Image (spheres, grey):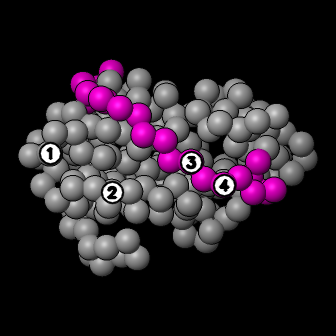
């Protein structure tokens, strides 16, 4: 699949239990690479497709593809069913409205009786196993993602940051992710 960052092999993995389809883009022979660059990217229709400036998802997606393309081998696993950290598109839009009223991203989920982060990464471990990848350099700012994957048996040899330039529209969101969720973003007060 040709992209703005180069050519990738594209494969669809379908979860038998849910029917969710995850898109995996690979470059090079990830199964033979020592520790390929891997991005487990949660779907974000607003950011990835429409370029919403409320988040940094679309920018992280593009930056990850750029970094993988520049490496010898790597893959991006685009995880469906992860919209809004797992709460779904409708609830995410409701969360946006609550954020417009002054709630932060965590409070907006909690106000709806939803988890702060309901994502699971079992599919990532299964995909990496299928690709014969036993150790990765993980493209993420989220230490909890590292812990979740390691708990599933994925060896994360290094966390590689995927930093983006904050915008006036997403600074508060990013600051909440850093201060309340432990994301390593390097934002100053």
| Residue at (31% x, 30% y) in the render | 156
Extreme residue toward the right, this view = 101
Residue 163 tag number: 3
Image location (x, y in percent) of residue 66: 40, 62
Span shown in magenta: 151-171
- Name the image quarter holding the N terminus: bottom left
| Horizontal relation, residue 136 to residue 188: left or right | left
Label 3 near label 1: C-beta < 8 Å?
no
Q: Which of the marked residues, 3 or 2, is nearer the chain's N terminus?
A: 2
| Horizontal relation, residue 85 to residue 134: left or right | right
Mark 3 crowd level (few <14, some 14–19, many ≥20, 10 Å Cα) = some
Q: Which residue is mark 1?
A: 33
Image location (x, y in percent) of residue 91: 66, 49
Q: Is residue 8 magenta?
A: no
Image location (x, y in percent) of residue 108: 76, 39
- Name the image quarter holding the C terminus: top right
Q: Is 168 above or below relative to 4?
A: above
| Depth check, front residue: 165 or 26 | 165
Q: Is residue 12 visible?
A: no
Q: Which of the marked residues, 2 or 4, is nearer the chain's N terminus?
A: 2
| Mark 1, secondary structure of its residue | loop
Q: CA distance from mark 1 to mark 3?
A: 24 Å
Q: Which residue is mark 2?
A: 68
| Mark 3, secondary structure of its residue | loop
Residue 8, quarter of picture: bottom left
Label 4 near label 2: C-beta < 8 Å?
no
Q: CA distance from mark 1 to mark 2?
A: 13 Å
Q: Is residue 161 magenta?
A: yes
| Residue at (75% x, 57% y) in the render | 167
Residue 165 tag number: 4
């Amino acid at each position: 699949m040709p992209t703005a960052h180069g050519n990738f092999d594209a494969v669809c993995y379908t979860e038998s239990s849910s029917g969710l389809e995850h898109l995996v883009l690979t470059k090079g022979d990830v199964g033979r690479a020592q520790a390929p660059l891997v991005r487990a990217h949660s779907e974000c229709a607003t950011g990835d497709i429409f370029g919403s400036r409320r988040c940094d998802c679309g920018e992280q997606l593009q930056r990850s593809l750029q970094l993988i393309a520049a490496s010898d081998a790597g893959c991006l696993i685009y995880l469906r069913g992860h919209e809004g950290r797992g709460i779904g598109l409708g609830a995410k839009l409701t969360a946006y409205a609550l954020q417009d009223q002054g709630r932060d991203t965590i409070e907006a989920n909690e106000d709806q009786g939803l988890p702060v982060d309901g994502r699971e990464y079992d599919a990532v471990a299964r995909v990496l196993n299928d690709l014969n990848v036993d150790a990765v350099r993980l493209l993420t700012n989220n230490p909890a993602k590292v812990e979740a994957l390691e708990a599933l048996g994925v060896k994360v040899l290094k966390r590689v940051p995927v930093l983006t330039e904050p915008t006036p529209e997403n600074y508060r969101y990013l600051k909440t992710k850093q201060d309340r969720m432990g994301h390593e973003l390097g934002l100053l007060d």
